[in-house]
Amino acid sequence: MWHRVAGRRERPIPYTATVAAPTDVLTDKLAGFGTTIFAEMSALAVETGAINLGQGFPDTDGPVEVLDAAVDAIRSGVNQYGPGLGHPELRQAIAEHQHRWFGLDIDPDTEVVVTAGATEALAAAMLGMLDAGDEVIVFEPMYDSYQAGIALAAASPVPVLLQPDADGVWRFDADGLRAAVTERTKLILLNTPHNPTGKVFDRDELDTIASVAIEHDLIVVTDEVYEHLVFDGSAHVPIATLPDMFERTLTISSGGKTFHTTGWKIGWMTGPNELVTAARMAKQYLTFVNGAPFQPATAVGLRLGDDYFTGLRDNLQTARDHLTDGLGRAGFTTYRPAAGYFVTVDITPVAPDLDGMTFCRELPQRAGVVAVPESAFYMHPENGDRFVRFAFCKQLPIIDAAVDQLVEAFG
Ligand code: PMP
Ligand code: GLN
């Protein structure tokens, strides 16, 4: 999966050829990683004035109670380093949240750590748990920081491919998952609900993953940042709730998606003390602590009534439908997502001769829209060449305008 070029270890195909990495200085561990696809595509949107359906961030503010709580915290002096584990109020609110929504009993003093977004929790988990040469099973496509976090820990990702079935539901081959386990496998990195596909791993799939983890004594690290954004009456099932799974699962989430505060970077990890501590050991040397006034504000958000969470989900489901239906009218093959912020399309019907990267680089000129090529989410980018991701965490008039432009360009 890795090969050496001129003595350096490189990813098979760097996806950001535009970025000249300082190769004489850069650690071998990051050889082949360029600037992230999100930064590249958001810069393209700014440069061209195109509608940005690339990077996943909402274009409206979240609940006013949460914003006010942050302002109050700043004004009342919550502006210095806080406790290493995170603000006690937020840790308590996280524990309450896990109980209220998922029936999990978490000790806020020993089984919760607040992090600089889910991103830091993921990196800390990899750095705190992995040794050089360890293997991590990942489902691909995967959120881009996973490969980098694993690489920084000098470990190796081992991909299990998700592919759409005849009904357009993304599935993995259970035998492929079992075959991916070797004596070097240390953990399985799961993401449900899933970015970029919007897949919600169902109970049978989670049972399969859990049985593999238990049989081979693996840790599961699960990224659940889209936990509240599940559509069509389905439910998110945390793998930590399955029998015998809590003790081997580190669950990661954050407030960015749920409270429209992606720039605050307040995340957390929960799980048995042994796992949380391993990740915390790395986390304390990455940021030590972060975002003091945003922590009590995020606690206010987590304690909002059910209406807030269901309203957020319902509005997003409407946006999902506008965008998915519109992309279908423009001629793309669409995979209606069951959750999250994004819809994946196959560009073959509208651009049979282009790969997704070229298509996305040309899209601002052709249609005044920015999207993200999913090849960036694969270890072998050719597996994702046909797939492009559009974000629908935007106001309906923006989505509708983007759809009009895409229909005009391709429909
Ligand atoms: N995991 C997934 C699957 C994501 O889509 C994102 C992007 N928001 C993150 C982690 C990062 O979350 P945060 O902004 O809280 O670091
Ligand atoms: N999670 C968001 C996405 O997938 C943004 C991530 C980022 O900018 N690093 O688009």
Image (cartoon, rainbow, N blue to C red):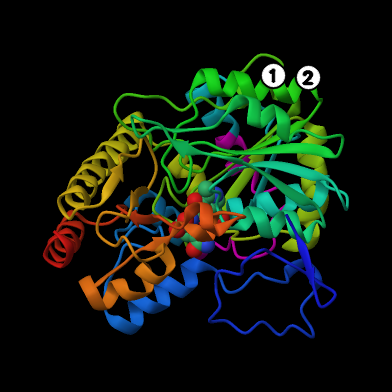
Mark 1: amino acid? Ser
What percent of the width, then of the height, locates residue 108?
68, 34
Q: Secondary structure at mark 1?
A: helix
Residue drawn at x 61%, y 57% is: 145
| Residue at the spot of label 1 | 211
Residue type at mark 2: give it.
Answer: Glu
**Rendering coords of residue 166 (x, y %):** 36, 30
* Quadrant of the image containing the C terminus: bottom left
* Residue annotated with mark 2: 215
Q: Quadrant of residue 29?
A: bottom right
- Find out whether residue 91 is within the magenta segment: yes
- Residue 296 in view (yes/no): no
- Compared with 43, 106 (above or below) is above
Image position, residue 137 (x, y; %): 70, 40
Say the numbered circle drawn on residue 86. none
Q: Write the start and end of the magenta stretch as one range.
A: 72-94
Q: Residue 52 placed where, x, y %?
A: 31, 67
Q: Is residue 103 left or right of residue 281?
A: left
Residue 346 inside the magenta-drawn segment? no
Label 2 with label 1: CB-CB less than 8 Å: yes
